[in-house]
Image (tube, grey):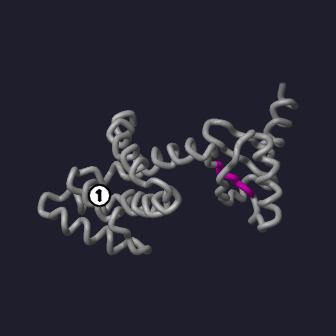
Amino acid sequence: MAELATIARPYAEALFKTAGADLGGTAAWLDELAAIASNTQLQQFAGNPGVSSGQAFDVISGVAKAKLSEAAKNFLRAVIDNGRISVLPEIASQFRALKNAHSGSSDATVYSAFALDGAALADLAVTLEKRFARKLNLKVELQPELIGGVRVVVGDEVLDTSVKARLEQMKVALIA
């Protein structure tokens, strides 16, 4: 993975410098392109020597839901021309890290057993921002096996208040 990170870093830094004030918009189209590029069939198609750069560009830009800006098209062409489609997800990850460092925030994933409504998520966000002492960009994923409660992952920090985790703690205490 270090090799992918090394390859992706110059692309992410250059894109960050050129994005200027439109970091949010750039992150949106970059995340979409990264999701498209993570498809193994697309990577095989683009890596085929019989497929031209223009054909790969047409397929990727055709799959994109949003209309790509000229900057996005130019970036995509540069990535395709250099044979770096498989690196796009890592580029997006490093760009997000640069964007978060610039804004003083972090990405957080909240795993919940049940769907959270807007008010509950807002209350949780306030609590978590106090707990982690920084602004968080929350993403919610459902995990019914948690039974109840939430599990929050912020970078390499984990806060697990789920019923499943508490039952595991009780099991360890009873066995010991």
Query: Which residue is at a point 82% across and 62% down the rendered structure image?
Result: 120
Secondary structure beneath dot 1 equals: helix
Residue at mark 1: 43
Query: Is 89 on the left-hand or right-hand side of 96?
Result: left
- Left or right: 49 with respect to 156? left
For residue 13, what is the image quadrant?
Answer: top left
The single residue placed furthest to the left in the displayed view is: 50
At 53% from the left and 59% from the top, the residue drawn is 24
Question: Residue 4: which quarter of the image?
Answer: top left
Main SS, magenta residues? strand
Q: Position of residue 113 (x, y in %)?
A: 75, 58
Q: Residues within 10 Å of mark 1 (few under 14, many from 20)?
A: some
Picture quadrant where residue 172 is located: top right
Q: Nearer the viewer, residue 169 or 16?
A: 16
Q: How many marks?
A: 1
Going 87% across and 31% down the picture, which residue do you hit? 174
Q: Amino acid at mark 1?
A: Gln
Give residue 34's position: percent from left, percent from top: 41, 57
Quarter of the figure with the C terminus? top right
In the image, what residue occupies the spot 38% across and 40% down?
Answer: 9
Q: Is residue 98 above or below residue 74?
A: above
Q: Residue lying at the far front in this picture: please name it.
A: 21
Query: Residue 74: image x %, image y %?
Result: 29, 61
The quadrant of the picture occupied by the N terminus is top left
Q: Which segment is the magenta one? A: 108-112
